[in-house]
Amino acid sequence: MNRAPSATRETPLSPSQRAGLQAAAVHGEGHVPPCLPDVELRQLAVLGLIETLGAGPEDRFGPLFRAARYGITEAGRSRARREPLPQLLLVPCSMGKAQVPAAPAAEMYVGAYHVAARKAASAVAADGSAQVLTLSAKYGLLRDDDRVLHYDLRAGQNGTVSARTLARQAHFLGVSAARVTVFAGRAYADLAATIWPALEHPLRGLGIGRQLAFFAALYRPARRSSRP
């Protein structure tokens, strides 16, 4: 009996390649985020999913203003539509901070709410299905090893990071097309919504006590299940 030929198998993409391709697909000029390692960029180019752009100005103003080196192709846009969206969990910064002038984000924020939110987000992302970033009222999107200066600012106050800066950061980090869940209060959810209007905010309408209980329910089950 003759069998129908199997569909051509596509070369698998790494999580960062998928995220970068989707970020390029939603970028106004189709630019690929510069955060992707060179080896992964070259692989995408070999697959015909991205192409090199003309040489731009030198990087004189930091990575957020770095000239794009690659742009997405039509084949890349088609592939992006078939790939799952990256998952991003956002936790808020905190007024409680380490008593040092500067530190990595993972060490700077020591407030109880931030710690609980971070533990909950880390539990959800433990299987590698999501990325966790801190949303700082002053500095925007932070990875754990991003160093920040000590500051006193809440989201919504004068000096809060601008939507334009957040958009640049989201593209640079390859999360501008991500499905976003915010583990924070309304002010931080509203700030994130300037970039991701369709974000999920499971804490909406909950008082602080119920928010903390929500976090605890996410990070405590593993500990309970390990008891005899």
Image: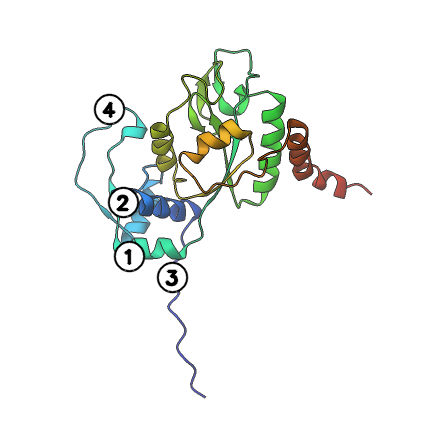
Q: CA distance from mark 4 to mark 2?
A: 22 Å
Q: Give the distance between the C-alpha atoms of the residues marked 4 and 3, in whole angstroms.
A: 38 Å
**Residue 66 at x, y percent in the picture:** 27, 31
Which residue is identified by label 1? 75
Q: Name the spot of residue 88 as percent of width and height, x first.
A: 49, 40
Which picture quadrant has residue 214? top right
What residue is pinned by disc 2? 30
Q: Is residue 52 above or below residue 151?
A: below
* Label 3 vs 1, first from the N-terminus: 3
How far apart are the two marked residues, 3 and 2, measured between alpha carbons?
22 Å
Quadrant assignment, res 56:
top left
Mark 2–mark 1 Cα distance, whole angstroms, equals 12 Å
Residue drawn 54% across and 38% down? 201
Quadrant housing residue 168: top left
Judging by the rendered image, the residue that carries numbered circle 4 is 60
Badge 4 or badge 3: first in the primary sequence: 3
- Mark 4 vs 2, N-terminal side: 2
The residue drawn where x is 62% and y is 35% is: 120
Give the label on residue 5, or none.
none
- Residue at the limit of the structure toward the left, as seen here: 54
Residue plotted at (45% across, 43% down)? 198
Mark 3 — residue?
Answer: 10
**Label 1 is placed on what type of residue?**
Ala
Q: Secondary structure at mark 4?
A: loop
Q: Amino acid at mark 2?
A: Gly
The answer to whether the residues at label 3 and label 1 have Cβ atoms under 8 Å apart is no
Which numbered disc, 3 or 2, marks the residue that appears first in the sequence? 3
Q: Nearer the viewer, mark 1 or mark 4?
A: 1
